[in-house]
Amino acid sequence: MAALAFMGPAHASEPDWQLNGFASLGVARSSFDDAAYRYQPTADAAIGNDPSPRIDTLAGLQLRYQPTDSLNFTAQLLARDPPVSGSPVVLNWAYLGWQMADRTELKLGRIQLPFFMYSDTRNVRYAQPWVRPPGELYGLVGNSEHHDGAYLRNLQALGSWSMVTELFVGYGANQNRNSSPSGTYYGIALTGYDAHWTLRAMWLNGNTHMESPALAAVLATLQQRAPDVAADYAYETLKNAGYHTIGLRYEDERWLLLGEIAGTRTGNTRILADDVAAYLTAGCRFGAWQPYLSYAARRSAGVDADPRIVDPIAARTVGAVLAAQNYSQDTASLGLRWDLALNLALKAQFDRVMPRDGARGTFTQPLPAGRQHSDVISFAVNLIF
């Protein structure tokens, strides 16, 4: 799949140069200013009571040059609200593509690892039913935007079905609000599809190097006040960190059913939480209109107090860090998509976001006393060209 879902493979009879793009112009507001809503909990952007374009406004340009039938050079620039401080423009794709055989393609360079069903088109909001992908699941990758490495894709026919096998390896580094993780990851994704059904599974593994002044201070406190457990909270090198996902999609001229479940493994440390997330979306098309319902959930594990830590200062310090990583929440969504043209869609979406298990969820701070949810209202215009 190309970076843009609406782009097909180039052929020798087509121009050597192709320029495509996408854009999303959106605004959103939530119920509270103090407990502002974060779509991505590791990013800076937060939505309060005043309408804001920060999480739903972005644009991309993709340039593809094909000098021969088997080679292409592809690059994509993405303009968005940066996850943390930095340039609003990032080189999201930059790879050499080689069509090794009729059904086998190799990419070398800057790529997107296929974490989820909409990994390639994560930023192409026109290609998705929602205003934005469910944050409970798509937020599991943190502020990761691209990796530098290799990607191999093979397509095989299995009767009326087709099977896509993806093998990949890549190095990625990103900046979160409180940490700077980096590492090399490898994995495999298997996708089977026919005219209506798509089934997908992905497994990814690797080692993560973590830099974090905040976590360094916690570890120093443990080494001083609870040295017998401090080794369990070391975080600089996280071995066997990764993700696993399973996805399903059904679509015909009228109905859409879409769901994914994913889990994270933070590796060999007690100081970081693991998460499991899932969503299910159902939509029905009436001409150019598609109303949809969606429900998403995320649960954080490993965020409870460690009973082995008896020193009160160490216990409070570790407890605060773990509690801050508890992003457990549910989101119930009602939305409407209106396709004005072949390449233009308007969307409206209402989200009821509900923190669970005593967590603050993805909000900047706990909801006001007595409040169990915050409502997020969003409008967006999605365009491809």
Image: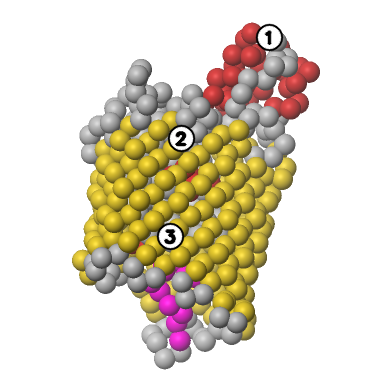
The quadrant where residue 346 appears? bottom left
The residue pinned by badge 2 equals 329
Give the class, few, some or many, for how many residues have Cα within 10 Å of label 2's Cα (few <14, many ≥20). many
x, y percentage for residue 258? 45, 58
Q: Quadrant of the C terminus?
A: bottom left
Front-most of residues 171 and 385 = 385
Nearer mark to the viewer, of 1 and 3: 3
Report the residue marked by disc 3: 257
Badge 1 amino acid: Asp
Q: CA distance from mark 2 to mark 1?
A: 31 Å
Whichever of labels 3 and 2 marks the residue nearer the N terminus, that label is: 3
Magenta-colored segment: predominant secondary structure = loop
Q: Residue at x 35, y 51 (%)?
A: 293
Disc with the residue nearer the chain's start (2 vs 1): 1
**From which residue to which does the magenta span run?**
1-11
Q: Secondary structure at mark 1?
A: loop
Looking at the picture, which amino acid does disc 3 mark?
Answer: Leu
Residue 86 location (% of width, % of height): 42, 43
**Amino acid type, residue under disc 2 in the picture:** Gln
Picture disc at residue 55? none
Query: How packed is label 3: few (under 14 Cα within 10 Å), some, or many (20 or more)?
Result: some
Task: Compare marks 1 and 3 and give the one earlier in the sequence.
Answer: 3
What residue does disc 1 label?
Answer: 311
